[in-house]
Amino acid sequence: MARTTVQDVAREAGVSVSTVSRALTGGTVSASTREAVQAIAARLGYQPNRAARGLITGRTGNLGLIVPDLRNPFFADVAKGVTARARAVDYGVFITDTDEDPVAELEALASLGRNTDGVLLCSPRSPDADLRKAADPATTVLLHRRVPGLSSVVADIADGIGQAVRHLIASGHRRIAYVGGPEDSWAARQRLAVLSEVPEVMVLDPVAPTFEGGLGAADPVLAGPATAVLAYNDLVALGLLHRLAARGVPVPGRISVVGFDDVSLAAMSHPPLTTVTVPKDRSGSVGLDLLLGHTGAPGDQMILPTHLVVRGSSDAPPS
Amino acid sequence: MARTTVQDVAREAGVSVSTVSRALTGGTVSASTREAVQAIAARLGYQPNRAARGLITGRTGNLGLIVPDLRNPFFADVAKGVTARARAVDYGVFITDTDEDPVAELEALASLGRNTDGVLLCSPRSPDADLRKAADPATTVLLHRRVPGLSSVVADIADGIGQAVRHLIASGHRRIAYVGGPEDSWAARQRLAVLSEVPEVMVLDPVAPTFEGGLGAADPVLAGPATAVLAYNDLVALGLLHRLAARGVPVPGRISVVGFDDVSLAAMSHPPLTTVTVPKDRSGSVGLDLLLGHTGAPGDQMILPTHLVVRGSSDAPPS
DNA sequence: TTGAAAGCGCTAACAC
DNA sequence: GTGTTAGCGCTTTCAA
């Protein structure tokens, strides 16, 4: 299965390799030559070697996507958005799952940076300084994270949180517990900043941004006076729901639960979770367009809208 | 940020480019030279250009992974296994999400086939013939699908189903409903073949292999005499659980529910789902090793063990 | 409009 | 053990 090269096509067509190249990539060639070359290339099943092309053009036609954990439905959604858009614009995408390891993240950034035309980076927790040092601003777009000097696409967290809180207050809640995420997480700090200002909100100890984190937070929540609880994200909310059910605590009868992100699982729980929709896949496609210069300018900070989705896990407080 | 090349490292180290290449790729070099070169490469942040390397070695150092849907936790797990192993052996992974589109799948196979050293393919539904025609047996490994003539890694579905059924029967169930998956799905056919032989099992109409599919199957199940239901997969089981809860039907009090795959959500439901564990991430890493020839031989059909996990959704039938 | 030739960055003979 | 050199397949000056 020797692959056909420009040489083969050139020989067969009786022209030079440069003419073949021009005929195939839209250079200046006579119409008849172009047709002949294209016909022969098709007949021979010629497929350009992208590596060789990239070596000379300097562009690879490939992109990188770095995520902490593909198993996390949030990042799976982001990846889905990226790959879908990449397919549409005929780019390949390398995906690296760093398994939440900041060292692996930096390594991936270095390696991918060298072998792609740009990289989309989901880094919830690495320090700003590390990112600014390791990422080339011209070829990197941050997803769901903002660092001065780097392009980014983030969701309007403050607005989303605001909608959730207003919903709860409008429903009659006066004591709202907040179970936050890791203190080194950018998104967690964003949420905390907003919620610290709300008098009705009592900030509890942060937990891991996982189902298990939510599990452990249920009892502390129940120990307080809150009639509603706002979770760092849907995974935490689901853990809360699970433990609450195990304790025989009616939701939303005794306590309302609100998540964040609106991952697909959110609609599958019982009761279905009230949460804030974050345009996850859209963030991926928008980020890709930003990276490729289809939209915006390097250095741009994009903010995508969020909106509350009221499902069954929230209602008025017990009277 | 001019990219550093072997030239730069060579100049800095005072050696030739070939010595640099050897020092970095494990050729014959003196220990002191190797150390010096490596130190300088590290200091300069040298990252080899894989395209250039691939041009000469004929190997790209990249792999392809094709999945129908990254959002499906099953495939997210598989992808996680692949990327983790790839990172360990220093390979890049192109991931293509075909969005369940068989045409996109074939296109991805063609495109990836040319630009990688091999591809791992998750294709639950494409016809055998299409796959055999489009895939190069030497550089393709099928995941969770078996097609004669192609290498593959599959789970021991028959054994897993057997364990689930025996568990149910041993618990006292005599009428077990089976809600199967799409008839054109390889895995669905595997399950059906086993279950058709079991007298206690009543096969209901197949559904989409999704949460929604499960939702719709609940009423038909309840309409019958079954005291237990075996679902095509966990997503379907979760849908079942959800609708059952909405109907006020106690699980496992009135009816037991058993899933398949053991995706992470399975442990998060209420009650937690009894299911069959499929080594999803392991299938990814094993497939990768098969592809790279670290293990087995081309054409090999690997079968990974499965095992039942009994959680809260199954128990004895109502007395 | 076309061809010859020069590399892109790297590895692999082949000398020394 | 190390340097020199010849390409891998392709695009792109530069001449013709």
Image (cartoon, coloured by chain):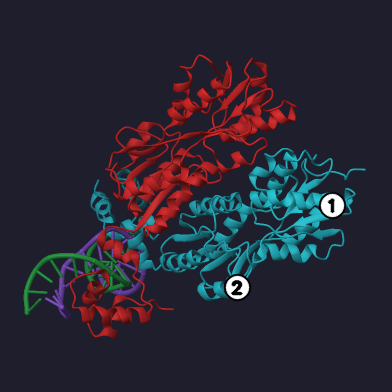
Chain colours: A red, B cyan, C purple, D green
For residue A171, above or below residue B187: above
Residue B15 image offset from top left, x and y in percent: 26, 55
Label 1 vs label 2, nearer the camera: 1
Q: Which residue is labeled 2 in the image? A: B128
Residue sitting nearer the eye, B203 or A14 = B203
Q: Identify the subunit bearing mark 1.
A: B
For image coordinates 56% across by 26% down, the residue present is: A230
Circle 2: is it few (<14), some (14-19), or many (20+) Cα within 10 Å? some
Quarter of the rendering occupied by the C terminus of chain B? top right
Tell me: A7 left or right of A169.
left
Q: Which residue is labeled 1 in the image? A: B226
Badge 1 or badge 2: first in the primary sequence: 2
For residue B44, above or below residue C12: above
For image coordinates 59% across by 39% down, the residue present is: A266
Q: Amino acid at mark 1?
A: Ala
The secondary structure type at the circle numbered 1 is loop
The secondary structure type at the circle numbered 2 is helix
- Distance from label 1 to label 2 (Cα)? 35 Å
Circle 1: is it few (<14), some (14-19), or many (20+) Cα within 10 Å? many
